[in-house]
Amino acid sequence: MRRARPAARDRIRFWNAAQPVLVTRAIIVVNAILFVWVLFGTDRFIGGGVINSHEFDMVLSQYFIDNGEWYRLISSGFLHFGLLHIGMNMFLLWQLGVLLEPALGRGRFALLYFVSMLGGAVGALVLSPNALTGGASGAVFGLMAAATVGLQQRGVNPFKTGIGATLILNLLITFTIPGISVGGHLGGAIMGAAIGYAMLEPRWNRDAPWIGWVAPVIGMVASLAVVAAL
């Protein structure tokens, strides 16, 4: 007798269970595709040089927001200026995604990522409104800060772990190397810490799990309100 094939629904369920970092992978793939698209037709690979037309269409600046191009709050978070830029961000995103996505679940992890991205965009507009800003660093800093807060809530000193050391090192780089968006990094970290606290608080996860869904939505609304008020 031939064994019956599993139903399509079962195959999907099994595949789904084997993908604990699906959102992380998807974000990295989108960043990589857009990085190649941005570089198409240019000779800039490592970094530097004059901004090209594709970067100009995605980059964030207060001028564009004033002209109604609010989509740049998101598009700029997928823009990278060179191989080193995207390489560092995607490396950190992978490490943090492996840690946080299985703990939060795909939906809440995606919300944490994008609310951190918006927090970084707001920070960049506040501290350097006329600069041309891009990169996933704001979102990545948000994930780092959320992981730091989550460890602290569970009684683990994050600064005795790799997460705390990575956060400190990246903050030092932020304030010492010219050309880095201080506002973008700090805005993402502050937003990530706040939303991470709401999502990863053990007592709230047990007694009021809805807070983990509502908090990032409130963060997004607050970010848009700040941008509108600038």
Image (tube, grey):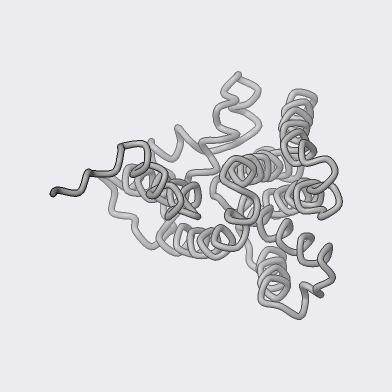
Can you name the residue that lies furthest to the top here?
A: 68
Vertical placement of residue 152 versus 33, above or below: below
Q: Position of residue 129 (x, y in %)?
A: 69, 38
Q: In which quarter of the image is residue 147?
A: bottom right
Quadrant including the C terminus: top right
Judge whether 11 appears above or below 85 on screen. above
Quarter-of-image position of residue 151:
bottom right
Instruction: Please name the residue shown 68% across and 63% down the image.
Output: 174
Please tell me in which quadrant of the rendered image residue 117 appears. top right
Where 68 sits versus 56, above or below?
Answer: above
Which residue is at a point 41% across and 54% down the rendered structure image? 49
Is 49 placed left or right of 126 in the picture?
Answer: left
Q: Which of 6 and 62 is in front in this view?
A: 6
Q: In this view, does 95 lie above or below 74?
A: below
Q: Where is residue 134 in the image (x, y as percent from the top left)?
A: 55, 46
| Image x and y of residue 102, in percent | 58, 56
What residue lies at 79% left-to-right and 48% top-to-bottom?
205
Left or right placement of residue 113 versus residue 2 in this view: right
Report the front residue among 172 and 150.
150
Q: Which residue lies furthest to the front in this view?
A: 1
Image x and y of residue 219, in percent:
76, 36
Viewer-proximal residue, 81 or 192? Answer: 192
